[in-house]
């Protein structure tokens, strides 16, 4: 059974941050140096742009 992660505007910051960093890692993208200071909204926007270009994370088996 595969697991996927669902993010919403109400997800906590750490969950969003971990998803964003894993998405960047899986696609070989360098993260901005100040990503630790980003708001949840900015992280979600980053994720949306990155997923549009590279696709969503693969489900964890």
Image: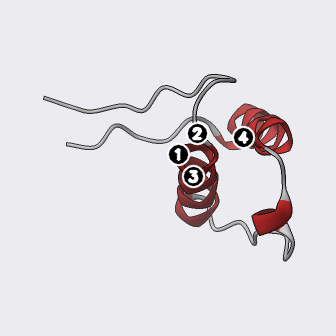
As rendered, which of 42 and 58 lies closer to the eye?
42
Crowdedness of circle 3 by 10 Å Cα count: few (<14), some, many (20+)? Answer: few
> Residues at badges 1 and 3 in contact (C-beta under 8 Å)?
yes
Residue at 71% over, 66% down: 29
The earlier-in-sequence mark between 2 and 4 is: 2
The disc label shown at residue 14, or none: 3
Query: Residue visible at 77% across and 45% down?
Result: 43
Q: Secondary structure at mark 3?
A: helix
The label shown at residue 12 is 2
Task: Label 4, secondary structure: give it.
Answer: helix
- Marks 1 and 4, Cα distance to the nearest angstrom? 12 Å
Q: Residue tagged by mark 4?
A: 47
Circles 2 and 1, Cβ within 8 Å, touching? The answer is yes
Image location (x, y in percent) of residue 38: 84, 55
Q: Quadrant of the N terminus?
A: top left
Query: Is residue 4 shown above or below 35?
Result: above
In terms of secondary structure, where does tag 2 sit? loop
Residue 21's place in the image compared with 42, above or below, is below
């Amino acid at each position: 059974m595969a697991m996927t992660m669902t993010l919403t505007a109400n997800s906590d910051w750490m969950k969003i941050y971990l998803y964003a960093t894993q998405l960047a890692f899986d696609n070989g993208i360098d993260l901005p140096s100040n990503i630790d200071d980003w708001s949840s909204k900015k992280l979600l926007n980053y994720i949306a742009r990155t997923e549009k270009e590279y696709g969503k994370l693969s489900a964890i088996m």
